Amino acid sequence: MTNSLLPVRGSPGSPYTRKMLAVLRFRQIPYRYIQAEDSTLPKPKVGLIPIFYFPDNTGELVAEVDSTPIIRRLEAEYPQRSVIPSDPAIAFINYLIEDYGDEWLTKAMFHYRWYYQDDIDMAGSILPHYADVTQSDESMSKMRGIFSERQISRLYVVGSNDVTACVIEDSYKRLLDCLNQHLKRYPYIMGSRPGSADFSCFGQLTQLVQFDPTPTKVAVKSFPRVHAWVSKMEDLSGAEVTDDGFVGGDVLPQTLTNLLSEIGRTYVPVMLANSDAFDQSLRTVETIVEGKIWVQEPFAYQAKCLQWLRIEYGRLDQDDRGRVDAMLAGTGCEKLLLKSSQN
Ligand SMILES: N[C@@H](CCC(=O)N[C@@H](CS)C(=O)NCC(=O)O)C(=O)O
């Protein structure tokens, strides 16, 4: 029986795990969720969660990580209840917002979790239990110290430091405001049915809006609608959707354009500066975001993300490129595509 269930390894404290479980539920794809180390399963090439175990053509399981391509693979293998808009221009917008959720919003998630003492205490005392709740209190308190120190020492990886803290926090609050405005009219970011962009933002927000005390306070006090949205997104297995449910046409709703402008203020300059740092073999990424200095170490994976985004754009035909260009004009996001559009 379990053979027909797609095995997925993850953890409740992992935003990407939450993203993918919510996709599986919405898409009504039967899965089994593995929350513990299982030595009988193969190891992925990169030590990240969530891990999906797909059977190869001999039936042998192969471990895969990286939620964005896995979502596309699931689309090919399970046709029903797609999370990718069929209109290529809207699919591109969905891809861009998905990447923003995965690559920018995660900075807020990691920053808030490991920057302030209240948040460090909560995450440090709860997260290690996810590996095994039957561990003794002694073992847990040891784990708590090791785990917290390791995570705090990695804040620099996402670019969180004393200089960038307020840029990250302001961007989180503006995002909540954008979502709050948008959700007054549409149940999902992508319209009246959820796209993969909804799930990437949701994944990060499960932690920001509902777990870590400092960012949760912001949401509860000022954005209860977004808090409720996150709870509803968790399990959309029974949500009814129609083929024309995604936003469409040539003009996006103003609230979605506002979200793109928010993306243009933060994600865009940092992704561009990061990619330039790689091109020029710089040891530090330095740019200005919202008038403040942004410094971080170059992040190879995010340079690849920008390449992939440009490849998606390059796949559009001329008509759809023109539509995307018009949708992005003036939001700041058009700057991401300057290189590829010159090709
Ligand atoms: N790009 C990956 C990112 C996955 C990721 O960063 N996962 C985190 C947990 S949410 C992780 O496994 N970090 C390594 C660690 O915690 O040791 C995806 O979309 O799946």
Image: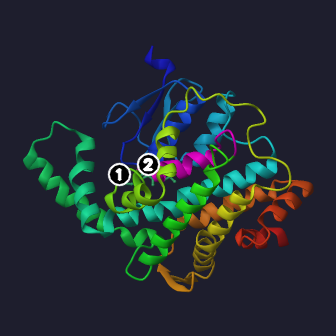
Mark 1: few, some, or many residues within 10 Å (few <14, many ≥20)? some
Q: Secondary structure at mark 2?
A: helix
Q: Which residue is mark 1?
A: 211
Query: Magenta segment range?
Result: 191-206
Q: In the rendered image, is residue 332 in sight?
A: yes
**What percent of the width, then of the height, locates residue 260?**
68, 63
Q: Is residue 183 left or right of residue 335?
A: left
Give the spatial CA distance, label 2 vs label 1. Answer: 7 Å
Given the image, on which type of amino acid does mark 1 rest?
Answer: Phe
**Residue at (34%, 36%) from the top-left corner?**
35
Locate residue 192: give its quadrant.
top right
**What percent of the width, then of the height, locates residue 274?**
57, 75
Locate residue 7: give its quadrant.
top left
Residue 218, compared with residue 236, is above or below; it is: below
Pick the quarter of the image with the C terminus: bottom right
Label 2 close to label 1 by CB (< 8 Å):
yes
Between 127 and 61, which is closer to the camera in this rendering?
127
Q: Does residue 265 show up magenta in the picture?
A: no
Q: Which residue is mark 2?
A: 206
Q: Secondary structure at mark 1?
A: loop
